[in-house]
């Protein structure tokens, strides 16, 4: 009994490590959400269920860690959408006849609420201070009040006075922040299992039963992650201080990066880049301190890093085409 409790506690730690965003400033990167025994030793029906989980894009709405064992599987997941969780349950239900299947689900304490009526403001639906006080964003969104806030006077006290705020601008900036964070999280979710999918489709121990499907899924995930990065670069450009697009530090990093020659190596790089970008974007909107230093944004530049990620996705497609 004690041994089982210790095992459950250990798995909870693994689950929490993978399911929660690393705190600002953290450099911890999850290399995969596939745990337990090597995938090649997993029973074919369990491997197929894992591939179907990604084929159906359930990985975007059910943040799950698959822990494979000799006679079963544990899935530790954070549920964002109840319908998707029911789809996951239906996916693994037929396997219960032959394998031990355990689902451990956690749900957010409260669901995201729609933006309220302006006459009934809710502080939880305000844009974060880092967005509301962003001069570039306010100019881009044509705030008629910004000129008053930005010239003379006590702008900080004006910004804290709810009676002086434009409700429509407030709504647009909140939606902007939500959209950026959604794209960022989607990019990371699509990329985190890319190494495992690439190993199943292109690795030395590729599995014939899921090889072609794994190849199709990892290419689809990589391309969609690249599209997310393109959207992020285009939209974040409006929120960043004007600077040269290519800093010496960013250029030096590009030159120092060793080229990947195998699909798995490139997939691992993409996975790490995507998670690092998600953390950087989260820190930009929710910094630990009152503001983010210019050096934090420019060394290397966030836009540079997103474009580098897009190039990595393009290189990955080229490597997989050669490996066919």
Image (cartoon, grey):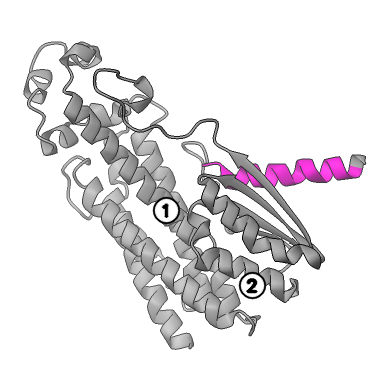
Q: Nearer the viewer, residue 170 or 292?
A: 170
According to the picture, the residue beneath numbered tag 1 turns out to be: 186
Count numbered badges in the picture: 2
Position of residue 196 measured from the top left corner of the image (x, y, whole percent):
58, 68
Residue 55 located left or right of residue 125: right
Q: Nearer the viewer, residue 89 or 200?
A: 89
Q: Nearer the viewer, residue 256 or 311?
A: 311
Question: Quick check: marks 2 and 1 in contact, CB under 8 Å?
Answer: no
The residue under the point 84% across, 41% down is 6
What's the mark number on residue 277?
none
**Is residue 6 highlighted in magenta?**
yes
The residue under the point 34% across, 24% down is 290
Q: Is residue 150 visible?
A: yes
The image shows residue 197, relative to residue 124, as above or below, that is below
| Residue sticking out furthest to the right | 1
Give the structural element (helix, strand or loop) at label 2: helix
**Is residue 230 highlighted in magenta?**
no
Magenta span of residues: 3-21
Give the structural element (helix, strand or loop) at label 1: helix
| C-alpha gap between disc 2 and disc 1 | 23 Å
According to the picture, the residue beneath numbered tag 2 turns out to be: 48
Judged by its main secondary structure, the magenta piece is helix
């Amino acid at each position: 009994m004690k041994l089982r409790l210790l095992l459950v506690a250990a798995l909870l730690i693994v689950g929490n490590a993978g399911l929660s965003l690393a705190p600002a400033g953290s450099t911890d990167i999850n290399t995969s959400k596939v745990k337990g025994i090597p995938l090649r030793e997993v029973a074919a029906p369990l491997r197929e269920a894992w591939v179907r989980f990604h084929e159906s894009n359930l990985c975007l709405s059910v943040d799950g860690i698959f822990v494979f064992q000799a006679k079963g599987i544990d899935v530790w997941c954070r549920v964002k959408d109840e319908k998707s969780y029911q789809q996951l349950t239906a996916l693994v239900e037929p396997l219960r006849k032959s394998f031990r299947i355990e689902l451990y689900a956690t749900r957010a304490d409260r669901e995201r609420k729609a933006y309220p009526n302006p006459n009934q403001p809710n502080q939880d639906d305000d844009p974060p201070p880092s967005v509301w006080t962003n001069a570039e964003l306010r100019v881009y969104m044509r705030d008629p009040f910004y000129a008053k806030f930005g010239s003379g006077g006590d702008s900080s006290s004006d910004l804290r006075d709810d009676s002086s705020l434009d409700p429509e601008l407030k709504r647009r900036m909140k939606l902007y922040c939500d959209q950026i964070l959604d794209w960022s999280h989607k990019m990371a979710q699509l990329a985190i299992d890319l190494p495992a999918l690439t190993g199943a489709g292109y690795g030395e121990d590729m599995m014939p039963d899921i090889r072609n499907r794994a190849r199709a899924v990892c290419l689809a995930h990589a391309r969609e992650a690249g599209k997310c990065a393109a959207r992020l670069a285009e939209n974040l450009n409006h929120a960043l201080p004007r600077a040269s697009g290519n800093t010496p530090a960013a250029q030096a990093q590009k030159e120092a990066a060793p080229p990947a020659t195998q699909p798995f190596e490139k997939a691992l790089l993409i996975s790490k880049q995507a998670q690092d970008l998600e953390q950087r974007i989260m820190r930009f909107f929710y910094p630990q301190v009152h503001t983010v230093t210019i050096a934090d944004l420019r060394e290397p530049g966030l836009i540079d890093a997103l474009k580098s990620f897009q190039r990595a996705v393009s290189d990955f497609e080229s490597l997989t085409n050669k490996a066919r």
